[in-house]
Amino acid sequence: MSPFTPTGETREKVYRFVRKRIVEDLPPTVREVQEAFRFKAVQTARQHLERLVADGRLVKARGQARGYRLPREPGTLFVPLLGRVQAGGLSEAIEECEGYIPVRSRGSAELFGLRVQGESMTGAGILPDDVVIVRQQAKADSGDIVVALVGDEATIKTLRLGRNRIELHPANPAFAPIIPRTGECAILGKVVEVRRYLA
């Protein structure tokens, strides 16, 4: 079936829907796919899903209503999405796993994802609701975009290293830099990727 036929286009939309739900750690049931696309019969949804499995684009675990998964490609890791980080002022650091995100392997580095809220990094192309992939590390170079912990509050900013102090700079002139006191700031990691999901 050509991907340019109506059926092929619908199947591609089904795949994108299922993939998004899997990434959000909420794999859909067949009936949820039927309802999302307003198919008249649940069998139509099942046929699309079975074809995606046959094509190797999805994997189905037997006996599980929510058993659809993305195939594990060589070099692909699933990293935890650990809640939100403020791109604005500081906000309390809360680690709450929302699901897992597939990323290409970056060696043995420990990675995690955070969903951005706030607009202080728009000049760096990081918008509200984007997901940033962060490599966990305690040090970074001046000019790196980092996730930093200031006291008990986390923020995403551009790191600037002075002689005797750390500065966290926004990429939006509407926001002021954050200049923590000595010993008050800890680097949690460096942003290595930004993802944006279109509705």
Image (cartoon, helix red, strand yellow):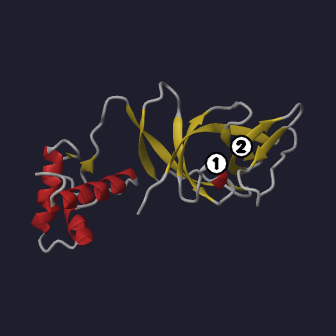
Q: Which residue is mark 2?
A: 158
Q: Are marks 2 and 1 in contact (CB under 8 Å)?
A: yes
Instruction: Name the residue that disc number 1 marks.
Output: 124
**Among all residues in the image, which is located at the extreme front?**
4
Disc 1: CA contacts within 10 A as few (<14), some (14-19) or many (>=20): few
Side of 66 relative to 90 (left or right): left
| Mark 2 vs mark 1, CA separation in Å | 9 Å
Q: Residue at x 76, y 47 (%)?
A: 169
Image vertical order of residue 9 relative to residue 76, above or below: below
How many residues crowd mark 2 within 10 Å: few (<14), some (14–19), many (20+)? many
Residue at position x 48%, y 53% in the image? 196
Question: Residue 142 location, x and y as percent?
Answer: 74, 33
Is residue 80 positioned above or below 84 on the image? above
User: Disc 2 marks which amino acid?
Assistant: Thr
Q: Residue at x 78, y 41 (%)?
A: 185
Which residue is most to the right?
A: 164
Counting from the top left corner in percent of width and height, residue 72 is at 30, 36
2 vs 1, front mark:
1
Lateral position of residue 115 relative to residue 42, left or right: right
Q: Quadrant of residue 149?
A: top right
Q: Where's the C terminus, which quadrant?
A: bottom left
- Please name the amino acid that badge 1 sits on: Ala
Secondary structure of the residue carrying numbered label 2: strand
* Residue 91 pos. (x, y %): 70, 57
Residue 63's spot in the image, x, y percent? 16, 51
Which is more toward the observer, 4 or 92?
4
